[in-house]
Image (cartoon, rainbow, N blue to C red):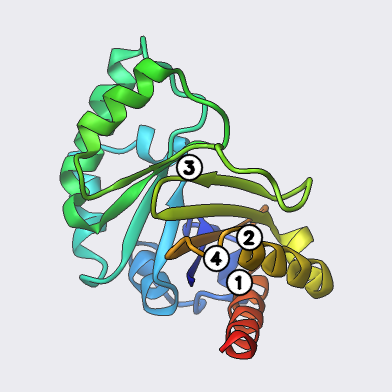
Amino acid sequence: MRMIIGSMGWDHPEWCEQFYPDDLPSEWRLTYYANAFPQVLLPAADWMSGDSELFRSWYADVSDTFRFILDVTGIEAADSQVLIQLQCCVSALGERLAGVVSWSALPQRLCTQLRVLLGDEAFLATPACPSVDPEVQLAGDRATLCILVSSEVGRDLHRLRLVFDALIEQFAAMPSVCLFISGAPPEVKVMRDAATLWQLIAGMQR
């Protein structure tokens, strides 16, 4: 099982004090973030407020191996404008889009529309998995498991260890796991600690 770690969003002003250099221009934040972490979860508010020019700049600001995941929680199948906006974002991000995730159940009609929009390369993760912790959200597709953990939960390394152990036990056959840290803002230290903890656990499993 391979775990990829990132945060919910990257443009957090508070990170200027704990992650981004003070003199870093705001338009360089994505590139700086992408040099430290391999993926990011984009809240609906972020991709809903953008346009094709902005999405293309996101594409250009990251390396070939970096991946975006779009949070589509709460969107409606009947809202054609939302689907048009989503299509614009998906098209601009191209192969740098890993997939979309919803932390709540989606109507079947919307799932069908999303699968057509995404094609065969990107995943559509929905909450079809049992939770390993009441405060940890899970959503999965056939080959990808997405996990949303708050900074508060992630600070407790013993609790996070129990979550990781449960994941290994329940989803050992899942080849890819995307772990996202949330918060206001997400804590970079929690992201790094989670990566270290997973490496230690994975090493013990070999």
Image location (x, y in percent) of residue 43: 48, 42
Indicate which disc, 4 or 2, sits on the residue closer to the N terminus: 4
Front tag of 4 and 3: 4
Image location (x, y in percent) of residue 109: 35, 16
Is any atom of residue 25 visible in this view?
no
Question: To which residue does mark 1 refer?
Answer: 191
Q: Is residue 119 left or right of residue 145?
A: left
Q: Are marks 1 and 2 in contact (CB under 8 Å)?
A: yes
Q: Secondary structure at mark 3?
A: loop
**Looking at the rendered structure, which numbered label has been put on residue 186?**
2
The residue lying at 41 percent from left, 19 percent from top is 108
Name the amino acid type tagged 1: Met
The residue lying at 53 percent from left, 44 percent from top is 139
Above or below — where is 28 with respect to 110?
Answer: below
Indicate which disc, 4 or 1, sits on the residue closer to the N terminus: 4
Question: To which residue does mark 3 refer?
Answer: 43
Snapshot quadrant of residue 38: bottom left
Above or below — where is 104 with respect to 99?
Answer: above
Indicate which disc, 3 or 2, sits on the residue closer to the N terminus: 3
